[in-house]
Structures are given as structure tokens and as C-alpha cells.
Image: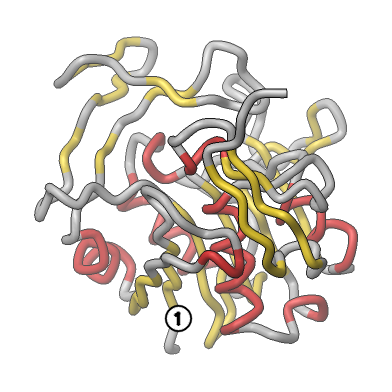
Amino acid sequence: MSQLTYQHTGRCPICEKRSNFTAKEGWYRDHLFCHECEGGSKPRERALMFAIRTFFPDWQRLAIHESSPMERGASVVMKRLCAGYLGTQFFPGVAPGSIHKGIRCENLEQLTFDDGTFDLTISQDVMEHVNRPDRCFREVARTLKPAGAYIFTAPTYKSQVKSERRAIMHGDYIEHLHEPEYHGNPIDPQGSLVTFRYGYDLPEKIFAWSGLNTTVMRFHDHNIGVIGEFTEVYVCRKTT
């Protein structure tokens, strides 16, 4: 067994169990696990669930849409405990609203749901991969009920005041504005292209795009296993 670089005992906000959070590598974002969670969980996933439980303690009774859920952590718990939970994936070439491999296909830029369908929309590290975030936020706001919220994670770069576009998708052609960067994708082994690096102006952009008011939660909490880089959670509320 490799030597641990980090170990701390606390209570996980996902599985709600006392857990020994451990890491074998110093990049805690991807290597600090709760081993009590089904499939394990990472800091940003625990931060997301902490935000959901804090702002919406009755989440189990709500209508929730999660875009691009994972097969571990918060996604698994929400699917199991919330009767109103719906997880969707985006499959290129598949008609939005249809079922593909047992999963509903939805494009955040053009959702097929009616206005005011959901209490909560959730995504985990999705928005840095979309081509038109302005359309995504407008569509999320449209499909939220009054007083609903979009709760999501996306890497926020401390050195950037302004968000930076990395690539533009023109149909089948990709215009790279910087060196291409890809992140893991649970349904595509080739990964997902990073289209944006977000800076501290993102809440203002969200309001301009959608009218959603945003609270940004930043964490450094050993007791819930949320330390390291890129742990921000965005809570975007619909006020009308």
C-alpha cells in the first residue's frame, strides 16, 4: 500500500457516515477520497452535497434534474433517496428528449423540459465544457420553478479576474484559442474538451445571461473532507 499524503477523520456530507478521508497523492481534488461513499467521493462532490443540504434540507422531496451524473458520490445518493430525481446525459447525434441506452438525452443549451419543471438543477464540472454557457444558463433558469436553484461545480481560477474562452465549437469543426485541454467524461473515453476557464467574474456573467442571483461557496474544511483546489460551489437562485 502506498504511503498516505493525507489522512483525517470526519463526517461525510454525502453518505453521512463517519469516515477516514485519505489521499495517496497531493492533488486532493482528484485523490482525496471518502471510502464510505458508494464508489468513493472527491472533495468537490462533498462540497456540492454540503451546499444542497445547507440550502435545501428538504431536497429528498424536491424535483431534481442532474445533468451528466456520475456513478458515485452525490449522484448515487440523490438517485436513491429522491423520488423526483432525474439524471440526463448529452449524447451527440441523439434526439434531445429521447431515451438512449436507458438514459434520457438532454442538451443544456436547448432543454426539452417545460417551463418551471424543477426545484433544483445540478451539474458537476459540466459548465467548463459547454459551447454556449449563456444559452445553458437561460435554459436552466427557464426550467426552474420560482425560488428554485441551479447548484453546480466548475473550476474557478484564482489568477483570473475575467473568464477565458479556450475553444469554440463550429459544428464538427473546433477552433482552439489555446492549447487543447480535456477532462474525464463518464460516457466518452476520449474525454471532454475544456471550452472555458472561469474567473471571478462568473457570477456577474450568470446574472447577465439568466437573471439568476449567485452565491459562491468556497471551502477549506478538514472535517467534511473538502480541501485543495477548485472546491467552489455555485448556488444560483431564481427569484421570480
In this rendering, the answer to whether 6 lies above or below 218 is above
In this rendering, the answer to whether 181 lies above or below 151 is above
The total number of labels drawn is 1
In this rendering, the answer to whether 176 lies above or below 73 is above
Residue 59 horizontal/vertical position (percent): 73, 78
Residue positioned most to the front: 3
Q: Nearer the viewer, residue 57 or 50?
A: 50
Tell me, what colour scheme is on the image? secondary structure
Looking at the rendering, which quadrant does residue 146 occupy? bottom right
Q: Is residue 36 left or right of residue 196?
A: right
In this rendering, the answer to whether 134 lies above or below 2 is below
Residue under the image location 71 percent in, 50 percent down: 34
Q: Is residue 12 left or right of residue 163?
A: right
Residue under the image location 19 percent in, 60 percent down: 200
Q: Are there few (<14), some (14-19), or many (20+) residues within 10 Å of tag 1?
A: many
Q: Quadrant of the C terminus?
A: bottom left
Q: Nearer the viewer, residue 147 or 179?
A: 179
**Which residue does the numbered mark 1 point to in the structure image?**
238
Residue 96 horizontal/vertical position (percent): 64, 37
The secondary structure type at the circle numbered 1 is loop
Q: Amino acid at mark 1?
A: Lys
Residue under the image location 17 percent in, 47 percent down: 163
Residue under the image location 64 percent in, 45 percent down: 22
Residue 145 horizontal/vertical position (percent): 59, 79
Residue 138 horizontal/vertical position (percent): 39, 61
Q: Quadrant of the N terminus?
A: top right
